[in-house]
Image: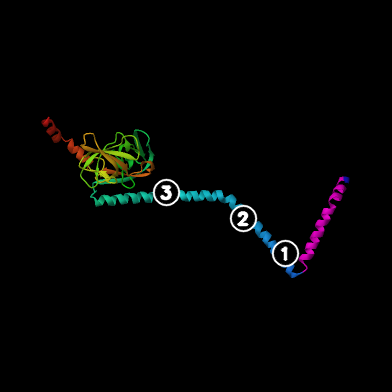
C-alpha cells in the first residue's frame, strides 16, 4: 500500500496535467460550431490516414500472392506466344516453299534443348523425336530459314543434329547470283564463320555477296541461306577461291528451329541402290 501511494504521488502532476488538457480540449471543442467542424475534420483525417496505412500494410502482405499470380499469367502468355511464333514460323516457311515449288518437302518445328559451340564436333539436341515425325537426314534451319545442321539420330522424344559448327559437317554451297559452287565446312575456329572452298577462280566473289545451298546435298533444298562473303583469296595454284563466309544463323542464340524433310530422298536412294544401277556399275568395272 505504501508503494502504491508513493507511485501515485510521483505521477499525480502528469495525471493532473492530462486531465486538465482533456477538459480544455473538450471545452474548446464544444465552444463554437467552427471548432467542432475543425476537430471533426482533423479526426477524420487522422482516421483516414490510419485506414490508408492499414490498407497499404495489407496490400504489402498480399504482394507475394499477387506476384505469383502474375508470374503464372506471364508463363501462360509466353507459352501461347511461343505456340503462335512457331505456327507463324512454319507457315511462313511453307509459303516460301510453295513459291519455290517445295511440295516435295515436309516441315516441322522444334525447340533447341542444348547446343554446343566450343568443341571441334558440336551437336544440337532437339525436343522432338520420331514419335512426332522426325527422321534422320532432315535439314535443320534457323527460324529465318538459314542453314544450321541436319538430323543424324533420334529417339521417340528427342533428336540429335550435327551442327554446321562441326568439323565433320559438309554441304555444297554457291554464290547466290551465279552457278559457281564449292564445298561448305567449318575449320573449328570462329563460330561465326564457315568456309566455302574449291570455288572456281572465275566466280570472283565479292564482300557481302550471299551464299546459299545448291540443292546437290541430300539434306538441304536449293536456295537455303548460308551466309555472306566476308573475304576471299585464291589458293596457291590460283585455280580456285577459298571464301570466308559469315553465317546468317546466329548459332549462339538458337531457340526454335525448322526441320525439313526431302520426301523424295528415300526414292532417290532406293533408285541409286537398285539392282539395275548396281549391275551397270559392275559392268563398268
60 lies left or right of 202: right
Any part of residue 94 in sight:
yes
Most foreground residue, 134 or 52? 52
Does 121 appear in magenta? Answer: no
Which residue is label 3 attached to? 79
Which residue is label 1 attached to? 39
Q: Residue 77, percent across and down?
A: 44, 51
Bounds of the magenta segment: 3-31
Residue with the most extreme bottom position: 33
Q: Residue at x 73, y 69 (%)?
A: 34
Which residue is label 2 attached to? 55
282 lies left or right of 34: left
Q: Is residue 11 above or below residue 154?
A: below
Q: In which quadrant will I find the C terminus?
A: top left
At mark 1, the secondary structure is helix
At mark 3, the secondary structure is helix
Q: Residue at x 28, y 52 (%)?
A: 95
Q: Residue 234, percent across and down?
A: 24, 38
Q: Residue at x 74, y 70 (%)?
A: 33
Does 7 appear in magenta? Answer: yes
Amino acid at each position: 500500500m505504501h508503494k502504491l501511494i508513493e507511485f501515485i504521488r510521483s505521477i499525480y502532476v502528469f495525471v493532473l496535467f492530462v486531465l486538465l488538457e482533456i477538459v480544455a480540449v473538450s471545452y474548446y471543442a464544444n465552444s463554437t460550431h467552427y471548432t467542432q467542424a475543425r476537430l471533426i475534420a482533423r479526426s477524420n483525417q487522422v482516421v483516414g490516414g490510419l485506414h490508408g496505412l492499414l490498407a497499404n500494410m495489407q496490400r504489402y502482405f498480399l504482394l507475394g500472392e499477387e506476384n505469383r499470380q502474375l508470374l503464372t499469367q506471364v508463363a501462360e502468355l509466353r507459352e501461347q506466344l511461343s505456340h503462335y511464333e512457331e505456327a507463324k514460323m512454319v507457315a511462313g516457311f511453307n509459303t516460301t516453299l510453295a513459291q519455290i515449288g517445295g511440295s516435295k518437302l515436309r516441315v516441322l518445328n522444334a525447340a533447341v534443348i542444348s547446343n554446343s559451340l566450343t568443341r571441334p564436333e558440336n551437336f544440337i539436341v532437339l525436343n522432338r523425336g520420331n514419335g512426332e515425325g522426325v527422321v534422320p537426314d532432315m535439314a535443320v534451319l534457323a527460324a529465318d530459314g538459314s542453314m544450321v545442321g541436319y538430323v543424324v539420330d533420334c529417339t521417340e522424344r528427342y533428336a540429335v543434329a550435327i551442327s554446321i559448327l562441326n568439323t565433320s559437317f559438309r554441304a555444297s554451297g554457291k554464290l547466290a547470283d551465279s552457278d559457281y559452287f564449292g564445298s561448305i565446312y567449318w575449320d573449328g575456329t570462329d563460330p561465326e564463320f564457315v568456309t566455302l572452298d574449291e570455288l572456281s577462280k572465275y566466280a570472283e566473289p565479292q564482300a557481302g555477296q550471299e551464299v546459299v545451298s545448291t540443292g546437290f546435298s541430300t539434306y538441304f533444298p536449293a536456295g537455303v541461306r548460308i551466309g555472306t562473303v566476308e573475304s576471299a583469296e585464291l589458293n596457291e595454284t590460283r585455280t580456285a577461291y577459298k571464301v570466308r563466309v559469315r553465317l546468317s544463323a546466329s548459332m549462339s542464340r538458337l531457340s526454335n528451329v525448322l526441320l525439313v524433310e526431302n520426301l523424295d530422298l528415300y526414292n532417290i536412294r532406293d533408285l541409286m541402290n537398285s539392282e539395275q544401277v548396281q549391275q551397270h556399275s559392275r559392268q563398268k568395272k
